[in-house]
Image: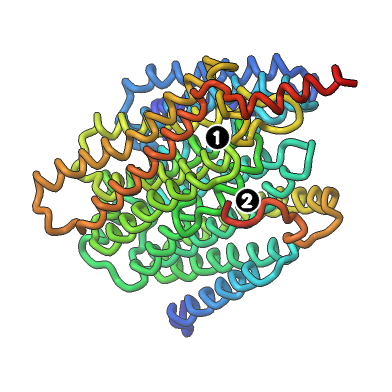
Amino acid sequence: MNSTDILSLTPLILVASSAFSALLLVVFQRRHRLTMVLTLSGLGLALASLAAVSGLAPRQVTSLLVVDAYSLFCMGLVFAAALAIAAVSYSYFLRRKERDCEEFYALLLIATVGAGVLVCSGHFASFVLGLEILGVALYGLAAYSRTGTKAAEAGVKYLAVSAASAAFLLFGGALVYADMGTLEFSRMQMLIAEHAGMLSVAGLAMVITGMGFKLGTVPFHTGIAELCHAAPAPVGAYVAAVYKGAILAFLFRCSAQFHLTESFPMMVLLLVMGGASMFAGNVLALRGKGMKRVLAYLSVAQAGCSLILCAMSGWFGSVALGFFFAAYFVVTAGGFLAVAALSVGDRDTDRMEDYRSLMSREPWIAGSLSAVLLLMASIPFAAAFVQITWLIQSDAGRLPWWLGACMGLGGAIGLYGNLRLVISMCTVPSVETAIPELARYAGPLEK
Amino acid sequence: MSGIPMEHSLIFAGTLFAVGLVGLLVRRNIFFMLMSIQIMLNAAGLAFVVAGSKWHQPDGQVMLMFILAVVGANLAVGLVLVLRFRCVFRSLDESAAGDSQGPC
């Protein structure tokens, strides 16, 4: 490892050192605004350094990390999302009158380092370390709020799901290693092409199960929905966008660069999981109680859509991939950030009634939430379009027909649900809803 | 590894993993859930060591070190959460936190 290698890791080093400075600052002085400024400037510097580092890419830094255009792009998305979330959580905590919220930023930065390592990883060890740095910091973030009982419950439930999925991932990795004799993804690719024994197939299935737990795809979707529902809204945004986004980015790299998902059973597994989550996520979002739950289920559907894209990513151009990723981060973080921006007092603005005719009260937030929901509904159709072009260009025999049907159906349900939400936000308050309000004001007058 | 075939050790690690998984699914006490998770993670560590000794590489043992670090971090944060849970709900039973269960 020489100085150029260290230079190419500058963005990660900057975020890590701002995490430590934030922690050190808390030791001496509890100042919310100063910690926030430190966080934002650290993330901003890291974003700026990405442009400087791009001259050194592509570069393999030891066998653990790969710094190339793709990982720099994903790191940019991760840092930008973390920046937006940190900025929104500042006003969120001020409005909630939460005390001692400085460590929140330190945890956020540590989790962001984990996400950065995850999107760069080219070796099983760095993948596990990145994922666990991200995951363990998220336990703290999920259980951060000390008012109410929800936070403790969210932390414990998430701990069980996340640690169990880490165990699945690790055991699967061990089985693959026993079969292949290497932990580097690029060498695994060659060996899998030559021979894949039963151990490797079992191991990869366990790895995919662990990934499914972490991503919250069907049949493991309840865990992530619980977490997003119970955690504070900015943490929901972080889980839905950065956490799941970084794992998806890693999966995309595995499938596009290392061709680990090209074998037929793996592809079918990904497609089935993706199609089922898209369908189930959109259906559950239709009957979900509470805005955060609806958004969590919609993010499950988005992750499903991305898994389908991931399975076919061998064909994708980098521009299409970049577009889908950027859209994923914007729509998943945007919804939760709108909830965070609306929340006042002890609890998050979570009830669906709070969003009825929101446009007349908070035009800016309602407008951006509507834009996010519409963009979210349009992504599956764009993906289906890409898929159809793919089917036309290649021999269509390998992909099952029900996948297109599932995507179309899931997309249609999603469009219906999201349009219903947008319309309910845009309606003018009706007489029926206005009457209880009037009665509330009239009550004191009558006395 | 002279004497013990790799398959036997892997079966042992797999059994250990299954014991942990069953414990996680069956027990409702958070403390025992944490212990089951530790068993699962340690089973993964054992499988890495077995695989490393098959290929005569140090990688398996290095992964075990990483796993031990992960286990330690999980346990530290997990125990803090257990204390917090106990403080809020006056119980270590996970089902004590009732209201937000169910699919919707």
Q: Position of residue A192 (x, y in %)?
A: 26, 61
Q: Secondary structure at mark 2?
A: helix
Residue A200 visible in the displayed image? yes
The subunit carrying tag 2 is A
Residue furthest front in the image: A446
Mark 2 and mark 1: Cα distance apart in space? 14 Å
Q: Residues within 10 Å of mark 2 (few under 14, many from 20)?
A: many
The subunit carrying tag 1 is A
Q: Position of residue A334 (x, y in %)?
A: 49, 27
A90 vs B45, left or right, is: right
What residue appears at the point 56 percent right and 43 percent down from the top-left corner?
A: A293
Q: Residues within 10 Å of mark 1 (few under 14, many from 20)?
A: many
Q: Nearer the viewer, residue A260 or A185?
A: A260
Disc marking residue A360: none
Depicted A73 relative to depicted A60: above or below: above
Q: Which residue is mark 1?
A: A238
Q: Nearer the viewer, residue A426 or A337?
A: A426
Tell if the residue under mark 2 belongs to the same chain as the one under mark 1. yes
Q: Which residue is mark 2?
A: A158
**Tag 1: amino acid:** Tyr
